[in-house]
Every structure is written in C-alpha cells, then in structure tokens.
C-alpha cells in the first residue's frame, strides 16, 4: 500500500525544499521536520501497549508505542537528517544503517555498507528521501527482509510515479508514506524534484 500526504503543512515544507536558495542547514532541518510528520501519519493506526511508569505521585499504567521494537533505518547519506527527526520522537528505538550508491549511467544501485541488527519481530521504519526508479528501494527492502523483517514502513519525501509502481509490484506488503509524488522521471531523475538531496544537505554540490 502507499499513502500520499495531503496535509497543507507537508506541501509547504516540500515547497521550501524546492527553493535552491535554502541553506544546507535549513535543508537538513526541513528534511527532519518532514520525517517527523511522515512518521506521525505512518503510526496513526499502530496498537499501543500498556506499561507502568513512575509519576510524581505513584506508579501509573499508561499506553505507549513500543519503542523497544522499533528499528529506524536510513539509506545513507541523504536520509540521515530524516532519521534524526524520527529518532527524536523515539529515543529508545534502535538504529540500523545501509549505504547504497547509484550508477549514474545505468541507474542501478550497489550496496556498499550495512549495519543492521536481526530484524525478526521488529517494526522497521526505512527512511529514503527520494524514490525515483524504485531500484535502490527494492534492493534495500530485499536486504531488510533477508535480515528477518516482515513489518516494514518506508518514508519518502519526493517520489516519481514509476518508482512507486515498481516498489508496489515487487514489495506489495511494504507500507509507503510519501510527502509528494512528482510528475515523472526524466533520465532517471525525479522531475521537478528537489535536486540531489545528499548534495544539498551536506553542501557537496559540484
């Protein structure tokens, strides 16, 4: 399934990202804010657990999300600011990491680093700002499933229709939450898009 946000604030923040005058710091901060908003929507139907906590007066049973079962995974490097935003909400969650590089001619992705725990029985939240062809995402989802993941939610800021279709065909069980679906792919890039999110976030534009 995929869920496209229609919230005016989400549209506002994505529009801010499109502005090439945005500084790298403001770009990273905005990625983090959108990450928080996306996870807010993604967890709207999650079941709460009951546990006792100490309060100012006495022990009290409360309902909470089970942070101990969450694993937050960015696809490096552009997703790092998104993960920072999400993990501020869930400081007890576990982090996992994977790095993939896309060949700019073939648009095929190559995994060159991963640090993932056993994901069996965990709620995995994958962060990847740009969903273009869907190749990198599908490869990342393959790896997560090899590590035991069966409950995966994937958060994206900008997507192309072609990438969404490819991901849904190959991984129909994964829940996609997307801030904005743009018009099309052009030579492997999302149009109009926001440019290279990693380069803009870390000021490595050539």
Image: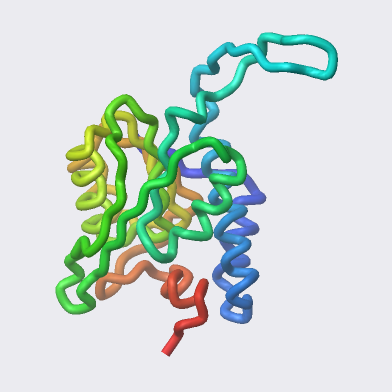
In the rendered image, the quadrant that contains the N terminus is top left
| Left or right, 166 with reference to 60 | left
| Left or right, 80 with reference to 26 | left
Q: Nearer the viewer, residue 10 or 93?
A: 93
Q: Residue at x 43, y 54 (%)?
A: 181
Image quadrant where residue 76 sits: bottom left
The percent position of residue 134, horizontal first and vertical second, equals 26, 55
- Residue reaching furthest right? 57
Q: Vertically, is 64 above or below 175?
A: above
Q: Nearer the viewer, residue 21 or 144?
A: 144
The percent position of residue 13, horizontal first and vertical second, equals 62, 59
The percent position of residue 194, horizontal first and vertical second, equals 48, 70
Image quadrant where residue 99 sits: bottom left
Q: Residue at x 21, y 57 (%)?
A: 135
Q: Nearer the viewer, residue 140 or 188?
A: 140
Q: Vertically, is 129 above or below 153?
A: below
């Amino acid at each position: 399934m995929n869920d496209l946000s229609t919230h005016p604030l989400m549209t506002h923040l994505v529009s801010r990202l499109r502005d090439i005058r945005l500084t790298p710091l403001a770009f990273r901060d905005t990625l983090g804010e959108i990450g928080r908003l996306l996870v807010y929507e993604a967890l709207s139907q999650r079941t709460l657990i009951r546990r006792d906590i100490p309060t100012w007066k006495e022990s009290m049973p409360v309902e909470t999300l089970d942070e101990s079962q969450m694993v937050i995974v960015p696809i490096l490097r552009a997703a790092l600011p998104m993960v920072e935003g999400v993990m501020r909400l869930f400081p007890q969650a576990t982090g996992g990491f994977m790095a993939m590089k896309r060949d700019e001619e073939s648009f095929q992705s190559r995994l060159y680093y991963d640090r993932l725990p056993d994901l069996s029985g965990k709620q995995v939240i994958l962060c990847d700002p740009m969903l273009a062809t869907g190749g990198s995402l599908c490869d990342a989802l393959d790896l997560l499933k090899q590590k035991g993941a069966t409950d995966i939610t994937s958060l994206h800021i900008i997507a192309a229709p072609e990438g969404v279709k490819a991901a849904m065909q190959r991984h129909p069980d994964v829940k996609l939450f997307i801030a904005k679906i743009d018009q099309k792919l052009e030579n492997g890039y999302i149009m109009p898009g926001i440019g290279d999110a990693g380069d803009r976030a870390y000021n490595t534009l050539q």
